[in-house]
Image (tube, rainbow, N blue to C red):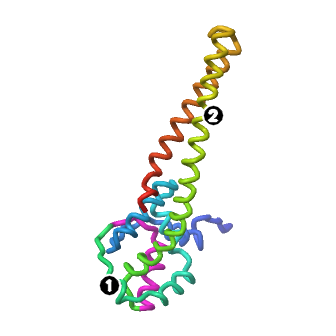
């Protein structure tokens, strides 16, 4: 009887196991919790994916563990928070935690500090977006004025005016979406 190749046997099965979701509770600083939430929400990244990204590199996690000062970590006021992580991420945390005899909480806390540079860069981009939004609003205002002028000259039923009206309606919708995005991004201002 010929051997049947089963795509789920072998290494692929272990890859799937690493993608399983598990819940884990950590005691983290409020700043770390806020950083995770802010990056996940603002950049549209699932928290699980975010954890996978910041913790999956075993070499980087190993290097990070060597720099952690447990006495300083214990001075940080922390509170419990439960997250969903992949089995692979939990395994990486557990391995490094056991190797260095340090709490997983410390590894997560210091791994999350990597996000601060992303948040600071995004905060600077937010300020630039606000400036550009003002220019965009002035541009849209000019479009509104042009539409009013065109309807006085040609009439609202003129094909040119109808097309211009569609363009103005799209511009209003775009302006509203940009304003909503900037409102959602205001959380960056207080970070």
| Residue of label 2 | 139
Residue shown at 54%/72% (left/top)? Answer: 14
Relative to 49, say whether 60 is above or below.
below
Distance of mark 1 from mark 2, alpha carbons? Answer: 53 Å
Q: Are marks 1 and 2 in contact (CB under 8 Å)?
A: no
Return the x and y of residue 65 as percentages of the image width and height: 47, 86
Return the x and y of residue 106 as percentages of the image width and height: 39, 81
Foreground residue among 24 and 160: 160
Location of the C terminus by quadrant is: bottom left
Residue shown at 60%/24% (left/top)? Answer: 144
Q: Quadrant of residue 118?
A: bottom right
| Residue of label 1 | 74
101 vs 162, left or right, is left
* Label 2: element kind: helix
Relative to 178, say whether 120 is above or below.
below
Q: Is residue 97 magenta?
A: yes
Location of the N terminus by quadrant is: bottom right
Return the x and y of residue 89 as percentages of the image width and height: 47, 73
* Label 1: element kind: helix
Return the x and y of residue 112 as percentages of the image width and height: 46, 72
122 vs 188, left or right, is right
Tag 1: Cα neighbours inside 10 Å, few (<14), some, or many (≥20)?
few
Q: Is residue 76 magenta?
A: no
Tag 2: Cα neighbours inside 10 Å, few (<14), some, or many (≥20)?
few
Foreground residue among 82 and 15: 82
Camera-side mark, 1 or 2: 2
Foreground residue among 48 and 110: 110
Please state the extent of the stretch shown in magenta in the rendering.
82-100
30 vs 188, left or right, is left
């Amino acid at each position: 009887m010929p051997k049947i190749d089963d795509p789920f046997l072998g290494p692929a099965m272990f890859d799937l196991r690493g993608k399983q979701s598990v819940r884990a509770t950590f005691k983290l600083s409020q700043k770390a919790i806020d950083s995770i939430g802010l990056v996940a929400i603002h950049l549209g990244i699932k928290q699980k994916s975010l954890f996978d990204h910041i913790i999956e590199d075993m070499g980087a996690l190993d290097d990070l563990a060597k720099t952690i000062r447990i006495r300083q970590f214990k001075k940080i006021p922390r509170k419990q928070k439960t997250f969903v992580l992949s089995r692979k991420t939990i395994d990486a945390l557990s391995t490094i935690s056991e190797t260095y005899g340090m709490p997983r909480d410390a590894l997560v806390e210091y791994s999350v500090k990597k996000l601060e540079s992303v948040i600071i860069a995004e905060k600077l981009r937010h300020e630039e977006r606000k400036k550009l939004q003002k220019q965009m609003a002035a541009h849209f205002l000019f479009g509104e004025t042009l539409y009013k002028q065109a309807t006085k000259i040609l009439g609202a039923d003129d094909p040119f005016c109808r097309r211009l009206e569609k363009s103005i309606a799209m511009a209003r919708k775009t302006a509203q979406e940009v304003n909503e995005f900037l409102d959602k991004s205001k959380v960056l201002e207080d970070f």
